[in-house]
Image (cartoon, grey):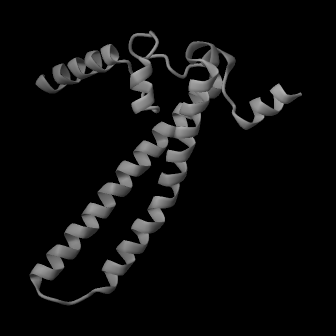
Amino acid sequence: MGNKQNNRDYPIHPAVIERLTKPLALKLYKKLIEKKTELSNRPFTSKHALSHLGRERGGDQADQVNRLQEEAKHTGQMKRDLSLLEKILQALERMENGRYGICEQTDEVIELRRLESLPWTTLSIEGAEITESEDLLKHAR
């Protein structure tokens, strides 16, 4: 009974626990949830900041340019946050289906240190290098 409750609290596939060990899998799961919560709350702050900027009408051209730059900065941050949030949601999904910690490029296990620093990563170091090389070749054409 305790095991079922634990699985409900932490929907981590047994293959992920076997690959990473239970303490590490739980640690990474909690990191992902904490970052998800942080990012989920962030757009409201940015939206508030943007609405504040929108109320500041008038001023000279320099003031208007500064407001536009601030709006662009906040919009860019919101886009980066949404992109990261999507990666986190996908990582949580991979934890549930058993693919978490497996490189999408090489199908090998992602280095534990890499997962600890970037728990939403989908690539091992080798996989990231391959992807980067492929991207460089695409852009060179």
Q: Quadrant of residue 98?
A: top right
**Residue 27, image x, y percentages:** 57, 32
55 or 16, which lies in front? 16
Relative side of 31 to 54, left or right: right
Relative side of 62 to 45, left or right: left
Residue 122 in sight: no
Answer above or below: position of 112 versus 90. above
Q: Quadrant of residue 30?
A: top right
Q: Quadrant of residue 100?
A: top right
Residue at image location 40% in from the left, 50% down from the top: 81
Residue 17 in sight: yes
**Residue 94, image x, y percentages:** 57, 26
Residue at image location 43% in from the left, 49% down from the top: 82
86 or 25, which lies in front? 25
Answer above or below: position of 20 versus 42. above
Answer above or below: position of 113 versus 109. below
Q: In which quadrant will I find the C terminus?
A: top left
Q: In which quadrant will I find the N terminus?
A: top right
**Residue 2, image x, y percentages:** 85, 29
132 or 28, which lies in front? 28
